[in-house]
Image (spheres, coloured by chain):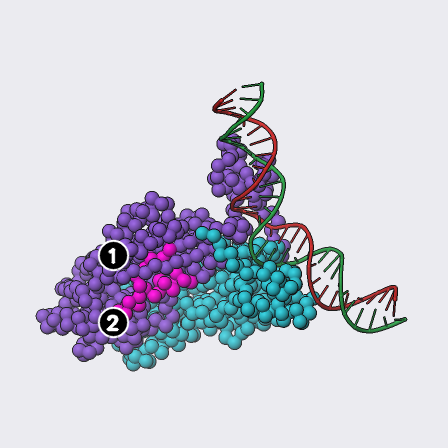
Chain colours: A purple, B cyan, C red, D green
Amino acid sequence: MEKDNAYLGVKEIARRANVSIATVDRVLHNRTGVSEKTKKKINDIIKELDYQPNILASRLASRKIISLAVLIPKVSEETDFWESPLRGVKRAGNEVKRYGVQLTTFFFDLNDKDSFQTQCKLILDADVNGVLMSPSFLEEAKQFSEACHKQKIPLVFIDSNVPDQHNLSYIGPHLFQSGYVGAKLLTYRLKGDRKVLVVNISAETDNYNYLQIEDGFRSYFKDQKQLNEIIRIDIRDTDYLSVARHLTQVFNQNEEIEAIFVTNSRVFSVAKFLTNSNRTDIALVGYDFLKENIDFLNSGVIDFLICHKPEEQGYRGIMALYQNLVIGGTVEKIHFMPIDIVTRENQAFYQN
Amino acid sequence: MEKDNAYLGVKEIARRANVSIATVDRVLHNRTGVSEKTKKKINDIIKELDYQPNILASRLASRKIISLAVLIPKVSEETDFWESPLRGVKRAGNEVKRYGVQLTTFFFDLNDKDSFQTQCKLILDADVNGVLMSPSFLEEAKQFSEACHKQKIPLVFIDSNVPDQHNLSYIGPHLFQSGYVGAKLLTYRLKGDRKVLVVNISAETDNYNYLQIEDGFRSYFKDQKQLNEIIRIDIRDTDYLSVARHLTQVFNQNEEIEAIFVTNSRVFSVAKFLTNSNRTDIALVGYDFLKENIDFLNSGVIDFLICHKPEEQGYRGIMALYQNLVIGGTVEKIHFMPIDIVTRENQAFYQN
DNA sequence: GATGGGTTCGGGTACGTACCCGCAAATTTA
DNA sequence: TAAATTTGCGGGTACGTACCCGAACCCATC
């Protein structure tokens, strides 16, 4: 029941190297003031002992706090999707705050590029030690990523990736494959080879994410040699009336639609439309574990929801920064989230 | 960047109560040697300040180690299912060992009740602070649970639950609902209303888990008014030859089987049989993310795998004990794992 | 009023690491 | 060669809590 006395810490290293603890400490934090010779000697001993610093003591002795910034879209009336990542962020924040880590959250408006840039500047001015962000605007995110890299601030992307950046990690879905899974699910409900409709409801002008999902979706049909014609529609105004108007038009022009795939969480709008227009026999697949979506899942209007664990993305994102900054460990550059399939039957136990 | 100086610890409590730190400490750990009057005074101040002990300092100062026991089936040649929980356990163990928590793992033979009891005794003799176990043998697990309760050792069940025990927590699937989901998935592949076969391959004599799954499975058919006749078969010898022999017999007696549901991870045996006997058009649903199962999923013989994140069960189980013993926090008594649906398309990103 | 035993409490050190301060030796400068 | 730096290093204290050791105090008893 006694703690393993054989714990080998700085004291033991110092003893073996015939130096003081302070010198070992200097080497460990590669501070100046140690001759090359002793530095090498100490490093050898560290390697030999496979020294693992005691984080408890380390964080306790350090009077510094580590401050992390989080930049995500604010929750709008239209969709509360970003509540989930925020929950995960807060949960992680709660866990690490006892280790002297502090979070500050910055929000931007998904319909306003400027707000994104403004918040980016605020973060850079705040002199933080790490950043977690959703790179909703591709070009602006790239610039910010560059700035972080120059200042050696580790940066983690969630929800969607920005390729070829010096970021610490990406934690989020493999969008192409996600669309592929969506197509597969849709085919379970396909009876004939009538038309399939892909709906993108988004005010965002950058449709980088959306394109990858649709790519995956179409690829499945191609791979399976499904003959269904795939038609598509973009709806820029995200309010229900606008969605209903556009869909009415599509249905007027295409009488043979037997399935709909919505590329994001706004599938509930489509479900509402189908309900209102008595078209609930149409197969419907969409994204994300939102309350509205679950309701339509339970009433059978939505057949499947695909989900990428948004809360866990937030949680893992913060933990990756913690890992990197506090523990000094390595973090995998890309961590793909699972592509979860949610149905009426298993939704009760889903962990968002 | 400086740590919040306003941290109020035992020192401040002692100052306000006009006592020494040691006295405050005695109250915090409700040790003896403090008069009721001062105890009350100190407790009031603790409440007033909403004092949160610094775990870092606490664990650092404590020379005690916390030792946890893990009791799970050993990995057999037949199935390596228990590798996953063990991985999760080890991952958690790795995380908490820096905080003075030590794990010892005990294995028993799923075909040997005695080995289970033997290991239980060993654990009780080892004077551990907490136990994580798979209650594979119901009655024996109950006895062990009682013993733990008497000795005030927190106990966590994973994989399956034992109702009405004084255990700290259960972390695992809702078996009934899991069977329900299995039935739903199977119906996606059902074309007519021919027979459905439920297969249970298990040497275990206690089929407590299995029964709940089959209950859920049948309930779905009842709820949906599916007319398919459900036949069932128990296979006690888990080797492939035995499985093939039993299945051959069933198929000889029932020509109209169009779908099979296997109630545990041994679905690969059935898949192998279907492959060997050219019956791959039959729908097949089973359990668990094992390599063999994934292979058959990829080759299209298995349609769906259901999975309850076994690795995470192990991880969360240890963390629950850590939470309870180190942090002193509360733990939810039942934590149902998600009922994950794994297909060929999303398996690459599944987190077991 | 002295003695004893129990109760209540404080001082002090330790946990392993971070980092300030200051001293001595080595090196450069005058 | 002496003085002024610079470099290399050790001593020591602090972080917030745990817990040992003993001291002071109380009340009862003779």
Give the numbered dot on residue A268. Answer: 2
- B73 within the magenta span: no
* Cα distance between the residues tagged 1 and 2: 29 Å
Mark 1 vs mark 2: in front: 1
Task: Please provide percent x and percent y for residue B178.
Answer: 38, 71
- Tell me the quadrant of the picture where the C terminus of chain B can be found: bottom left
Please tell me which residue is depicted at 51% across the width and 35% down the height of the picture: A33
Task: Please provide percent x and percent y for residue D27.
Answer: 79, 72
Q: Is residue B261 above or below residue A327?
A: below
Of B213 and A277, which appears nearest the observer?
A277
Of A94 and B341, which appears nearest the observer?
A94
Of B349 and A307, which appears nearest the observer?
A307
Task: Please provide percent x and percent y for residue B273.
Answer: 34, 63
| Residue annotated with mark 1 | A114
Please tell me which residue is depicted at 36% across the width and 78% down the height of the picture: B219
> In screen coordinates, is C21 left or right of C5?
left
Looking at marks 1 and 2 on the same chain, the residue that comes earlier in the sequence is marked by 1
The span shown in magenta is A69-91
User: Of helix, strand and loop, which one carries label 1?
Assistant: helix
Please tell me which residue is depicted at 38% across the width and 66% down the height of the picture: A351
Q: Amino acid at mark 1?
A: Asp
- The 10 Å Cα crowd at callout 2, few under 14, some 14 to 19, many 20 or more, is many
